[in-house]
Image (cartoon, helix red, strand yellow):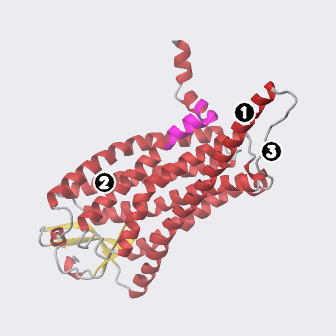
Amino acid sequence: MHSTKEENANFSAVTAGRLQVWDDQSKDPSVFTSATGFLNDRQLGIISLVLLSISQLCSVVAIISNSLSITVFVRLGFSEPSNISLVALAASDLACVVLSIWTNSCFLLSSMDVRLPFDATNVSYLTGSAPWAFISRTVAWITAFISFERCLCILVPLKVKKLITSRSTLTAMIIIFIFTFCPFLYVVIRNRFAWIFYPYLNATILDVVPIDNKYIIQIGYIIVVCCGVIQPLLAFFIVLMCTIFLVITLKKLSSWRKSVTSAKSQWQHKPGENPVPNSPPARDRISHKEERLVRMVVAIATIFIVSYTPTCIMLLCSVIFDEFAYFGVYKRMYIVSGLATFLTQTVSGGVNILIYYYMASKFRSALRCLLRLDRQEGEK
């Protein structure tokens, strides 16, 4: 038995982790394209096409880079706990990129009015943008874990080896995944696929139909606030604070080493004196190997902060301004912001391999061996 669009009520859609409620399903969705704001339909189409094109190109690069990163870290083994968290980070980035390609493709086909056997916007929401939003939280919390781990290595260097082991790191990655992705089950429970007949299309297509249950809807609001706003902002704040601490520590260590070098130079001219300055505090004394790892983590965290800032701004705006929503007055700006967050996080996930290559000698050697670059140079 076919049902019509008019039979659906209280349709809920999650875009970038925020639940939007549309209480009147009696109208055709096309009427909402007349929303006012800072952009008109033509400008929205041009900007969306540019962002989608760039995002799709970057996604292909990101798939290759993350696949290589996972392969290299697996080859290096998991004797070092940091390799486990970096593999989990690359795997989460890879999942986000694949989902963004699917979502962007559906959005592009929908904007081109291509006739499809399914509703591209709603189906891609349930199979693309919604899981992407939750997995992007996984990326955020793994980055927060990696940053916090480096802070512990500086604060409690003697105890950290007992605290951070391969087993504890793997356990932490599993907990993070459950903590960030399991709320997606609500989206699955809240919606179902159904074949629906649309009179204005004169066709039956696959669509997403919400389940009308007031208790499920009330639970949804709690999930949205906790997982859609508080959870990502808290992860962002942790990464930001840890990065600031690591940068300050590196600057102190760099200043101390410069002063030691200068003091030794003076001592060579005045052998009777020993003006070598006192050592830095215990928490700031780290080995050269640890220092290189801290610098790599700072680089990863900095790129994350830059790429995740648009997402945080979008989340805050959606909370402060009710009309900044997919079915609000500023729908066009909301769409552009959403596409921009897809792009920035895709770029972030794709450039991490460059950080590993230039700042981790083992990774660089393993990657060159995997790509057989050393052998090619030897043959030349």
Q: How far apart are marks 2 and 3 (CA)?
A: 57 Å
Please give the label number shown on residue 262: 1
Of all residues, the one furthest to the right in this rendering is 272
Left or right: where does residue 250 sit relative to residue 338?
Answer: right
Q: Where is residue 351 in the image (x, y as percent from the top left)?
A: 47, 42
The span from disc 2 to disc 1 (Cα, nearest Å) is 56 Å
Chain part drawn in magenta = 352-365
Residue 4 seen in the figure: no
The image quadrant that residue 286 belongs to is: top right
Residue type pointed to by label 1: Ser
Checking the image for residue 278, the label placed there is 3
Badge 3: residue crowd in 10 Å (few <14, some 14–19, many ≥20): few
What secondary structure prevails in the magenta region? helix
Q: What element carries label 1?
A: helix
Disc 2: which residue: 104
N-terminal of the two: label 2 or label 3?
2
Image coords of residue 281 (percent x, y): 77, 51
Q: In this view, does 98 lie above or below 137?
A: above
Q: Can you tell which of label 2 and label 1 is closer to the viewer?
A: 1
Q: Are marks 3 and 1 in contact (CB under 8 Å)?
A: no
Question: What residue sits 38% from the left and 85% below the top?
Answer: 213
- Residue 363: x, y in percent? 60, 36
Q: Is residue 307 visible?
A: yes
Please report the residue visible at 79 percent of the width from the left and 45 percent of the height from the top. Answer: 279
The amino acid marked with disc number 2 is Asn
Q: Does the magenta portion include 364?
A: yes
